[in-house]
Image (tube, helix red, strand yellow):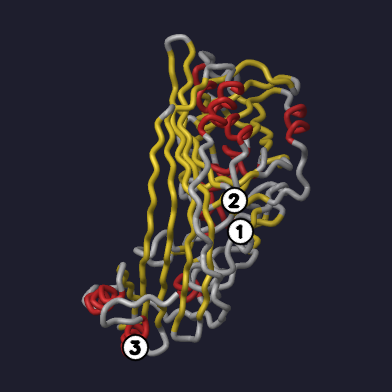
Amino acid sequence: MEARTPGVSSEDVVAELSRRSGAHWELYRKNGESHELTAAGASRRRAWRREEGWAARWWEQEGIRFACASRLDDLLTAISLAQSVRVRPSPTPDWPESRSPDAPPGAEVEPPPDLFPDLARALSAESRGEGQLAELTLSRGVAVERIENGSGLLVTQAAKTFDGVALAIGRRGGRSCEARVVFRTEEEPDMAALARRLADRAVLPLAERSTPLARGEWLLDPSVAAALLAGLSPLFTAERPPSWLSRPHFGSGQVTLVDDASADASFDGEGTASRRVPLVQSGEAVGRLRDLVSAARSGGKSTGHGVRPSYRLPPAVRPRRIFFETAAGVPPRDLLTSVKRGLFASALTVPVQVDLQKDHFEVEFTGVAVLAGRAQSPVSGARARGRLSQLLRRITAVGTDRQFFPMPYPTGAPTLLIERADFD
């Protein structure tokens, strides 16, 4: 794991950080490698990427400072230059102290399989020939992170990734619609499920009928529910949550939210151990997410939610794997048959719009009208809007079909049934 650049070692960087801040420093290293395959018709494009980066944080002149570079000698220079940058005064973080054995070396990364023909056939069958796969990009990689600090922390972990982006075109008569689906999976993706998502997004918007209802029940596909949850998630990291969140009930008794990334990684980007953090329990807000800096400001402890999107950015507090609990869930088919008069939102037309401070949401979607528990005609460009707090209190049931979506952190949601919503 040790990398050397001419004349500079990690020990030199540690010595400089210790000189500046005593024991209040952190040194981070990341190695990453990935193979990418982009397929479009008969065309195939392959790419190989490799990245190495270093980052340091330390407490100096009453504030947290940050520097990064792709080489150790450049990191030393960046540390020296960072002293001239004005920073926000901050209490000293309570640096973690745990140690772990080195992670095993990352296995050789294999190129992703060519799944374009299989997905193209599945999409054509699912859409009855109205949907065509235009492009599929798959990326398979591995990343190794190492963190040490002045309090004795030394941890290493490796993580594998398999990401994809699928682009489809729906055509009906003289009309067309482009649809894009982003996904992440541990192994090869579920072709049938992916084809259904693409078909819904590419073909349903071509329906000429807008919503037939001004008000009714609202059934949300897991992908739509996950997008809504991702829009809500800053509530659990904000230093000053909006006033409506202080009410006795966050949502209905069916709403239980948890963040738990322990299945993905042993610790976060600051070396704090991953753990399960309940956020909402049976409708009542019970927890918040913190990294080292926000924990120091609030006087609490980090919950293991210091996230690094890149070595070039300092850690920041955000969810790592947030999801609806579904232990008391209902089979999605039973949720559908329970709808007397409403709409099923199967795909988003535009990203979910959420204003947390003003307690407002707006969701534009395509889907299907539902009458007496049976799917009726497709609906295009329907919109639901209203107060976010009211929407959460109207969730009457959650399904058993929870799925995770990259938004960009894993966000898990099942089918949701909302007893009443306003449509236009």
Q: Earlier in the sequence, mark 1 or mark 3?
A: 3
Which residue type carries mark 3?
Ala
Q: Residues within 10 Å of mark 3 (few under 14, many from 20)?
A: few
Q: Please tell me whether mark 3 or mark 2 is closer to you in this view.
A: 2
Q: Secondary structure at mark 3?
A: helix
Q: Position of residue 159 (x, y in %)?
A: 53, 61
Q: Secondary structure at mark 1?
A: strand
Q: Residue at x 31, y 75 (%)?
A: 72
Residue 97 image label: none
| Structural distance between the alpha carbons of marks 1 and 3 | 37 Å
Q: Is residue 165 left or right of residue 68?
A: right
Q: Residue at x 56, y 45 (%)?
A: 405
In which quadrant of the rendered view does residue 69 lie?
Answer: bottom left
Q: Please tell me whether mark 2 or mark 1 is closer to you in this view.
A: 2
Q: Is residue 140 left or right of residue 281?
A: left
Which residue type carries mark 2?
Glu
Residue 259 image label: 1
Q: Earlier in the sequence, mark 3 or mark 2?
A: 3
Which residue type carries mark 1?
Asp
In which quadrant of the rendered view does residue 300 lie?
Answer: bottom right
Q: Secondary structure at mark 2?
A: loop
- Residue 411 to residue 286: above or below: above
In which quadrant of the rendered view does residue 123 lie?
Answer: top right
Residue 15 image label: 3
Residue 186 image label: 2
Q: Position of residue 108 (x, y in %)?
A: 50, 59
